Image (tube, helix red, strand yellow):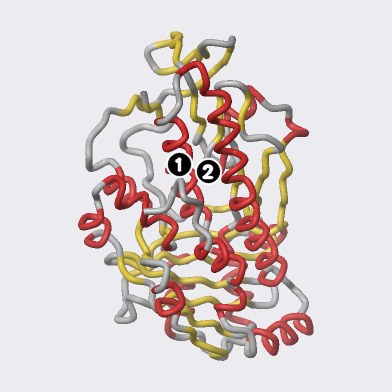
């Protein structure tokens, strides 16, 4: 039984970069042709200094090729691909209360038609960074939250000719990113919260003051954010739950460990974890589900938290305001390849657990 708190016509979200740890999920579902048709290869990464100068371009595709595909896809297209095998969804439904015993778990579900109860063998909570289900089983102090103090707007821009290129500009007091998906560029413009509270126009003006005559992708991002009526504001925080499971309820994805976007790996780790959880459950009897959930957590927590640590480290590098610090960072990044920056991610890709390997 799959429930979704939003409606069927809600916003499908924006861009995702999916690293090769998702390949076993795609293959397990038998949806690789659809996945390749609805996504685009991410082959190159371009880094610009805080003044807009091109610092380096790395062959991301080559770095990832030994492990599998690295693809850009919109969240809406990904949901379509993953659900193409069928299955029903109860929309505008959320979990209002949970009670458990040794044999089962009962959830009170709230929907437009009212509130009713269902009794099941397990609940998997994959309801995001601000998980309502998590709050029903864990105290607030059991969830660590990191607030970068930054936020920004996400929007769509028209695709350009460089459909395999992701580009980032790490500014002094701002961040500009652009990432290709099929037919579009996903773009993001971030800055300190005290500035973004003044609106996107104030942040765009600051970028234009610091970069003479923005062009190319940077100009496309600024223009798209300024023009978009439906842009999404993203407060750049993450979270880490002290435990992922309690008896027959388990958390998955951002509900267990919510990622900052800086390493572009949160969605990939969620899909990898989903497969690991599925394989634990499919070889477990109903009576032993709590043990299976603990095994899943023991397997995935170290991997997920290592990836999350990498995202946090990159955030400390990216989200800086001081120009002197930004200049030093530019000098370092000129000598540090994407392979080195994503070293912990490569370690995860090279050491895939047997339970999730293709």
Give the alpha-carbon distance from disc 2 to disc 1, as whole Å.
8 Å
Q: Nearer the viewer, residue 283 or 251?
A: 283
At horizontal 49% and vertical 86% (from top left) the residue drawn is: 57
The residue tagged with tag 2: helix, strand or loop? helix
Q: Position of residue 254 (x, y in %)?
A: 56, 44
At horizontal 64% and vertical 65% (from top left) the residue drawn is: 191
At horizontal 72% and vertical 86% (from top left) the residue drawn is: 327
On screen, residue 80 versus residue 48, left or right, reads left
Q: Quadrant of the C terminus?
A: bottom left
Q: Position of residue 179 (x, y in %)?
A: 42, 69
The residue tagged with tag 1: helix, strand or loop? helix
Residue 274 numbered mark, or none: 1
Q: Is residue 108 above or below residue 45?
A: above
Residue under pointer 2:
253
Q: Nearer the viewer, mark 2 or mark 1?
A: 1
Residue 293 numbered mark, or none: none
Q: Are marks 2 and 1 in contact (CB under 8 Å)?
A: yes
Q: Position of residue 267 (x, y in %)?
A: 47, 52
């Amino acid at each position: 039984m799959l429930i979704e708190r939003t409606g069927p016509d809600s916003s499908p979200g924006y861009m995702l970069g999916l690293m090769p740890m998702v390949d076993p999920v795609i293959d397990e579902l038998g949806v690789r042709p659809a996945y390749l048709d609805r996504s685009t290869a991410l082959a190159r990464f371009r880094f610009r200094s805080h003044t807009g100068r091109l610092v380096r371009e790395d062959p991301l595709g080559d770095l990832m090729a030994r492990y599998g595909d690295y693809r850009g896809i919109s969240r809406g297209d990904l949901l379509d691909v993953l659900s193409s095998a069928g299955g029903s969804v109860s929309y505008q439904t959320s979990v209002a209360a949970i009670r458990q015993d040794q044999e089962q778990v009962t959830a009170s579900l709230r929907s437009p038609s009212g509130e009713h109860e269902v009794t099941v063998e397990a609940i998997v909570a994959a309801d995001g960074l601000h998980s309502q289900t998590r709050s029903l089983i864990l105290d607030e102090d059991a969830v660590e939250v990191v607030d970068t103090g930054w936020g920004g707007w996400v929007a769509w821009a028209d695709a350009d000719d460089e459909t395999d290129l992701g580009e980032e500009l790490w500014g002094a007091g701002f961040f500009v990113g652009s990432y290709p998906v099929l037919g579009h560029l996903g773009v993001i413009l971030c800055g300190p919260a005290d500035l973004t509270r003044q609106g996107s126009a104030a942040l765009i003006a600051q970028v234009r003051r610091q970069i003479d005559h923005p062009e190319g992708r940077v100009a496309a991002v600024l223009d798209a954010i300024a023009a978009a009526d439906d842009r999404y504001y993203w407060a750049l925080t993450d979270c880490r739950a002290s435990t992922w499971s309690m008896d027959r309820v388990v958390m998955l994805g951002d509900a267990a460990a919510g990622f900052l976007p800086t390493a572009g790996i949160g969605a990939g780790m969620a899909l990898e974890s989903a497969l690991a959880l599925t394989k634990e459950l499919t070889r477990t009897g109903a009576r032993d589900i709590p043990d299976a959930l603990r095994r899943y957590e023991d397997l995935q927590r170290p991997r997920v938290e290592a990836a999350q640590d990498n995202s946090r480290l990159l955030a400390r590098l990216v989200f800086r305001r001081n120009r002197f610090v930004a200049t030093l960072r530019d000098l370092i990044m000129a000598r540090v390849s994407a392979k080195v920056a994503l070293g912990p991610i490569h370690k995860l890709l090279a050491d895939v657990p047997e339970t999730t390997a293709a």
